Image (cartoon, rainbow, N blue to C red):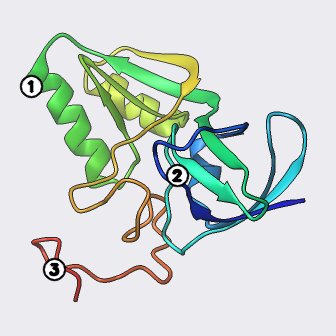
Amino acid sequence: MLLIEQHAAAAAVATEQLPLPFDSRCKSRLRARLASGEECGLFLDRGTVLRGGDKLQGKDGRVVEVIAAPERLMQAACADPLQLARAAYHLGNRHVAVQLLPGRLRLAADHVLGEMLRGLGLPVTQIEAPFEPESGAYGSHGGHGHSADGEGRGAKIHDHFGRAR
């Protein structure tokens, strides 16, 4: 089994790929399979959120690129920016991970949230696509901090200006 305990340089050339849905990319301890079928174990810093394109360093020196795997999502589309902002506000108020795209919002499939969005006047469709939600106002790409799944175990506490305390 390939052990992975650290990130690789962004410029490193990957020889392996690790396709993962978003929920799995929020776990710092994970047993998974590379695209080749080989088993691997992730042992990363707590609070790490992996993004598609991140590079990881295997204990044997191999570089593994994280791939945002397609997953079941809902997409709400709207040409009215105010209506779209209102929907994003209500989702954020519920601490829902949301991917923002021009004129569209994407989120994990959930019938209750789908009904809420329809009630706000947005058409909702089911899609299968990679999911890359916003990291949050104080989040950082693939680093420490508040995890996207709300665990926050071992995460540093930040003040309202993003400074660690």
Work out whether mark 1 precedes mark 3 in sequence or the reverse, and give the earlier one: 1
Side (left or right) of 95 relative to 65 = left
Instruction: Give the alpha-carbon distance from disc 1 to disc 3, as whole Å.
Output: 30 Å
Frontmost residue, 85 versus 19: 19
Image point 64% across, 57% down: which residue?
Answer: 57
Q: Which of labels 1 and 3 is toward the front? A: 3
Vertical arrangement, residue 30 with respect to residue 115, above or below: below
Work out whether mark 2 precedes mark 3 in sequence or the reverse, and give the earlier one: 2
Side (left or right) of 35 relative to 90 = right
Using the image, tell me which numbered label, if any, was put on residue 159: 3
* Secondary structure type for disc 3: loop
Amino acid identity at mark 2:
Leu
Amino acid identity at mark 1:
Leu
Residue on which disc 1 sits: 82
Amino acid identity at mark 3:
Asp
Crowd rating for badge 1 (residues with CA inside 10 Å; few <14, some 14–19, many 20+): few
Residue on which disc 2 sits: 50
* Secondary structure type for disc 1: helix
